[in-house]
Amino acid sequence: MTERFTKETVELDTGVYVWLHHDLTNAGFVIGDKGVLIIDSLRVPSFAKELLSDIKRITNKPVTHVIDTHSHWDHSWGNEVFPDATIIGHQNCYNEMIDIEWNDAWRRSVMADKAPWSDEASSVNITPPNLTYTTSMRLYFGQREIALHHLGRAHTSGDTFIHLPKERLLFTGDVAQSKGVPYFGDCYPEDWPLTDNNMLELDVERFTAGHGPVGTYAHLIEARDFIHQLIKLMKESKLETKSESESVLRVREALRPEFGEWRGFDRIDQGLAWVYQKISPVGGA
Ligand SMILES: [Zn+2]
């Protein structure tokens, strides 16, 4: 078992790195000709600065671009550390990050956690993307093609997949993890299965999620199957007019044989309750 909160920088391809933070949130970075592109700026400025100091061990080039995979605080609240960078996100990610109620709710929740970063979270200057897109966009970063795709709503309304087609690498944000249960509090359960199908159309050998280890295409298929089964089971349960608590129990136990060992499965009940509340019993997947 890996020790909690240990971190590790792994080079996936020449100049393409992941910064894995065990039990917390991962980031990525790509070194171009003139600058560095970061994928997710992490939860508070001190975390972003730690990432930056690890990047400085590898290159002196400045951070010119930051991509937010989505609006969640643990992925984007380090943005203020990069005032000179182009910060890129989906238009809906921007909309969520300028939503005062959304930000206040998250700030209250993070501060109530009394975690080591809770105090710092109270003074974060939430900094939304300054360049947005709606369907897809491409950066030619040095010699490398970096494609950003929004494949539908899923974990949030503004999830971005970052695909390096030549290297066959994908950054999935929190939509798909390798053997990990995602957070469902802000999700779109009607749309998520189709988004996962779209994701599998991309040519991918390995991927990095916002949480957990680097995975393979086979793990992406598992992540898709998990979401498909969960949504289908919950729809069936709601259609049979089962109550929320009955549905949570029933769906959790139906998923357990195949997914019971996944990270976060022991805390899945809250997530299933959120899906129950958001889902329509008929139609969709
Ligand atoms: Zn998230």
Image: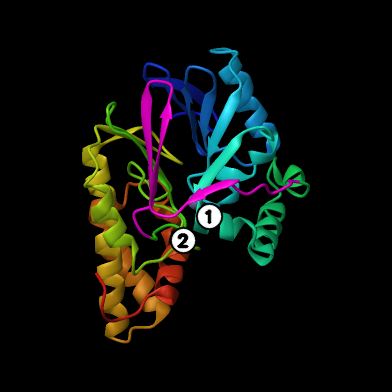
Is residue 229 positioned above or below 141 on the image? below
Please state which amino acid type lies under the numbered disc 2: Ser
Q: Residue at x 66, y 59 (%)?
A: 103
Query: For mark 1, what is the residue?
Result: 93
Q: Which mark is residue 157?
A: 2
The answer to if 127 sits in the magenta stretch is yes
Image check: 111 left or right of 233?
A: right
Image check: 102 left or right of 275?
A: right
Quadrant where the N terminus lies? Answer: top left
Badge 2 density bin: few <14, some 14–19, many ≥20, Cα 10 Å:
many
Is residue 122 positioned above or below 170 on the image? below
Badge 1 density bin: few <14, some 14–19, many ≥20, Cα 10 Å:
many
Q: Is residue 219 visible?
A: yes
Quadrant where the C terminus lies? Answer: bottom left
Please state which amino acid type lies under the numbered disc 1: Cys
Of 8 and 73, which appears nearest the observer?
73
Name which quarter of the figure residue 203 lies in. top left
Disc 2 or 1, which lies upstream in sequence?
1
Where residue 58 sits: x, y (%)? 53, 12
Of 55 and 109, which appears nearest the observer?
55
Q: Is residue 78 visible?
A: no
Q: Which residues are magenta?
A: 124-152
Q: Residue at x 27, y 27 (%)?
A: 166
Q: State the residue lying farthest toward the bottom.
A: 241
Name which quarter of the figure residue 164 lies in. top left
